[in-house]
Image (cartoon, helix red, strand yellow):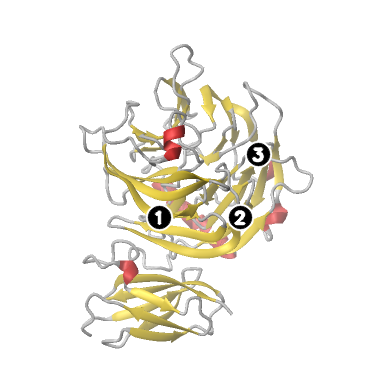
Amino acid sequence: MTIYRQYLVSSLFLLLAMYVNAQKHDYFWVMGYSSSSTTTAQGGTDIDFNYSPPDTSYVFRAMNIGYNCASVCDKDGNLLFYTNGCYIAGPDNLPVMNGGGLNPGWVADEYCEYGYLAVQGSMFIPLPGSDHLYHLFHLGLEWVDGIGGVSNFLYHSVIDQSLDNGHGEVVNKNSVLLTDTLAVGKLTATKHANGRDWWIMTQKMFSDTYYSFLFGPDSIQGPFEQHIGPANMDDNGTGQAVFSPDGSAYAHYDIYNHLNIFDFDRCSGLLSNPVHIQIPEFGDTLPSVGGLAISPNSRFLYVSNTYKVYQFDLWADPVALSKKTVGVYDGYASPFGSAFFSCQLAPDHKIYINCPGGENVMHVITEPDKEGLACGFAQHSFPLPTYNGASMPNFPNYRLGPLVDSPCDTLDYVGAAGEGFPVQSLLALFPNPASQYVTADLTLPDYSGQHKTELLLFNPLGQAVASHILAPYSSLHRFEVGGLPSGIYLVVLKMDGKVVGLEKVGIFR
C-alpha cells in the first residue's frame, strides 16, 4: 500500500515480540452448538492456544453459538467470559451475574435460542490500565422492511471480573454509543499509537461513512466520522473487517461490497488511500459467504469467498495485480460441505477458516507470511470434536505495542483532557470541508488568558504540519490551509499541554 507501512513493519514486530507473552486475551476460543443429551457430536468446542498444537475439547454447555461469537481471557490466557450476542457466560459455562438481555429487541426475541446474528457483532476489550474491568462492544440488530437486517445500535457493556467472588458481574449493560443504520457486523479495533488505548471502527450502511471511537482509561470518545471510498451497499452480515496486526491497514470484505483496503493512521484514526477490488472476477464461481484475515507480518491479505481463497500482497503496487489463488474447495463434506467462510489470525501465527455449515473441521493457512502456495493452505486439516455452526471468535490484536518514533503525542488523545473537560464540545471547525482557510471556534472551560493555548494540525500520516499559538482571550482563530495537499486532517486543541479538543477537517480542491 505505502512505503510508510513497509518502513514500520520491522520495528513494529520487534515490539510485538515484547508483548506476545503478556497479553493472551485471545488464547481461548469458544464455539459450537448447544449440547445435546443424546449425542456428543453436537455441543460446545473449546480451543486452547496455551498448548502447541492447540488443544481441542468437547464441552457440555447450554449456549448456542452461531455467527455472533466473542470471548476474552486474562493476560495469562485463562478464559474469563464469552458471549453469543445474547448473554455473557463465564468459564464455568454459566451466565455471569446480570449477563443476560444483551441487544434487546425483536431479533433477540426471535433468534437468541440459536445465537445472535452477525459475524463480528461482538468484541471484548480490557479497559486500558485495569486488571478486572472488561468492555463488551456489541451491535444490536433490527429488521427493516424493504432492506432486511441492519444494525441499529452500537452498544457497550462493562463486566467487573472482581465481583461475585471472582465470577464477574455486568455492571453497565447496553449503553448506547451510536444510533444509525449501521453495517451488520464487521466490528473491529486496533491499538492507538500509544500502545495503550484503542480505536474501534464500524461502518454505516448505504453510505461511505466510517465511524470510529477512541477508548481509553477514562472515556470513550466519539463517534468520529469520516467519508471515504465507495458506499457500503447491501449486506447480509457474513463478511468481515480487520486491521492488520501492525495497525497500518484496515480492510473489509463481503460478497456485496467486495474487497476494500485502506491505510490507517494509528495517531489520528483516519483512513486514507482507498483501494477497491472486485471479487469475484468474471468467470469465478459466485460466492455466498466470505471473510478475510491479514498475515502476522501485515504483508499478505487473504480473502475466502466460499469456494476459493485468494492472497493479496499489501506491499505491491497496485495491490489488485498481486492476487494469487491459494486454495480451491475440494468438495470435502463432513457432513454438508466444508467450503470457506470466516477467518481469524490465531496466537500460533496461523490463520484459521471455518465452514458455512455445521461442519466438524476447519481449514488452516499454516505459513501466512509466505507468498503464494508457500503459505501452506490446508483444507479441513483441523478437526473439531463437535459440529460448529459457522462461529468464529472476533479478536483484535491485543499484543500490538506503541508505534516506534510515534509522530503523535502518545498519551494525549484519551484521558489527557483532565478535569472533566468534554473533549468533543470544545472545538468546532468551519467551513468543513475547506479549501483555503479554516476557522476554529473555541469553547474553553477557562480562558482567562493565563493559559498557553495551541492548535496543532496533523496530516493523514499523523505528522504535525502546522502549529498555532492562540492570542489571549481569543475564541475564533483563522488559519490558512491552501498550501496543504487534499485529505482528511486532524486538528488538536491543547491547553497547557493537555488535549481539550479534537476535530477532523477535510481539505479539498
Circle 2 sits on which residue? 260
Disc 1 from disc 2: Cα separation: 23 Å
- Residue at the limit of the structure toward the right, as seen here: 283
Considering the image in quadrants, where does the N terminus appear?
A: bottom right
Q: Looking at the image, tell me whether mark 1 or mark 3 is earlier in sequence order.
A: 1
Q: Secondary structure at mark 1?
A: strand
In-front residue for pair 290/362: 290
Look at the numbered discs 1 and 2 and tell me whether their residues touch, using CB distance below 8 Å.
no
Compared to residue 480, the image places residue 219 above or below, namely above
- Residue 41, given in percent of the width and then of the height, sits at 51, 17
Q: Is residue 256 left or right of residue 172?
A: right
Q: Is residue 267 left or right of residue 364?
A: left
Disc 1 from disc 3: Cα separation: 29 Å
Q: Secondary structure at mark 2?
A: strand
Compared to residue 82, the image places residue 39 above or below, namely above
Disc 3 from disc 2: Cα separation: 18 Å
Look at the numbered discs 3 and 2 and tell me whether their residues touch, using CB distance below 8 Å.
no
Circle 1 sits on which residue? 178
Q: Residue at x 45, y 38 (%)?
A: 107
Q: Is residue 380 left or right of residue 98?
A: right
Q: Amino acid at mark 3?
A: Ser
Asked whether residue 337 appears in the rendered view, the answer is yes
Considering the image in quadrants, where does the C terminus appear?
A: bottom right
Task: Assess disc 3: are there few (<14), some (14-19) or many (≥20) residues with their C-alpha within 10 Å of its C-alpha.
Answer: some
Q: Secondary structure at mark 3?
A: loop
Q: Looking at the image, tell me whether mark 3 or mark 2 is earlier in sequence order.
A: 2
Circle 3 sits on which residue? 288
Looking at the rendered image, the disc whose residue lies closer to the viewer, 1 or 2, is 1
Say which quarter of the image contains residue 304. Answer: top right
Looking at the rendered image, the disc whose residue lies closer to the viewer, 3 or 2, is 3
Q: Looking at the image, tell me whether mark 1 or mark 2 is earlier in sequence order.
A: 1
